[in-house]
Amino acid sequence: EAAVTQSPRSKVAVTGGKVTLSCHQTNNHDYMYWYRQDTGHGLRLIHYSYVADSTEKGDIPDGYKASRPSQENFSLILELASLSQTAVYFCASSGTTNSDYTFGSGTRLLVI
Amino acid sequence: GDQVEQSPSALSLHEGTGSALRCNFTTTMRAVQWFQQNSRGSLINLFYLASGTKENGRLKSTFNSKESYSTLHIRDAQLEDSGTYFCAAELYQGGSAKLIFGEGTKLTVSS
């Protein structure tokens, strides 16, 4: 079954440390996205990609980098984690239209 | 965000009843999507509409692009319908279609 898989499911990171969140999709989708969700709020777009080896900035890219080494894989990198980056992070993929938008289960990140 | 406003922010229903959730857009959007975030935190794709009305079981959604709003109707609510419902507007920007999410409507269905 086609899916979007995120790892890890949860992580505790130290302020100033490096964090890498991974996402893998088997949907054969061209588009992949990283969102963050703060408690009680909607999702905000951090970075996205529409082709391997290329990434684009979303609405809140500061403090985050992204990497798309292949169509299936999309990573989110926090080079210097900060307390304000504590949130739940969702990866998603979609095809040429958004009608098949599929989310992963999320990664709960706590920065201490 | 500011471009997508959802109402109400919270809603309580008894099993078997129904209601409507609304999503207003402050600018012209190409399409709208509705998602349910369930109790486990998973986001489930409910509807994608570029226009008109779609129905799936006890859920029905409409998108009025001219008046910039969308609605999600729930009828015969069940306990498993509890969760947070997000609408997301599709905005074409920089050569790709982005989704802008509202803040959600938290639905609680009780017996």
Image: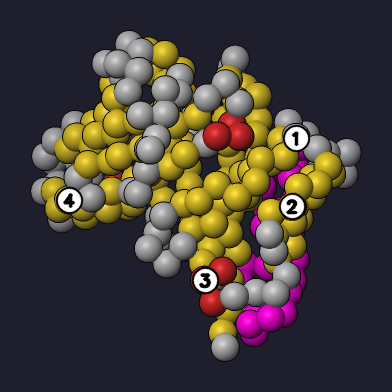
Q: What residue is at 75 percent from the left and 43 percent from the top?
A: B26
Q: Is residue A51 above or below residue B87?
A: above
Q: Determine which residue is flagged by label 2.
A: B55
The answer to if A106 sits in the magenta stretch is no
Outermost residue on the right side: it is B66
Q: Is residue B70 shown to the viewer in this render?
A: no
Q: What is the CA distance from the residue labelled 2 to the residue labelled 1?
A: 14 Å
Q: Amino acid at mark 3?
A: Glu
Whole-percent x and y of residue B79?
54, 77
Q: What is the CA distance from the residue labelled 3 to the residue labelled 1?
A: 27 Å
Q: Determine which residue is flagged by label 1.
A: B50
Letter of the chain that mark 4 sits on in the rendering: A
Mark 2 vs 1, N-terminal side: 1
Q: Which residues are magenta?
A: B1-27
SS at mark 4? strand
Q: Determine which residue is flagged by label 3.
A: B80
Numbered disc in front, either 3 or 1: 3
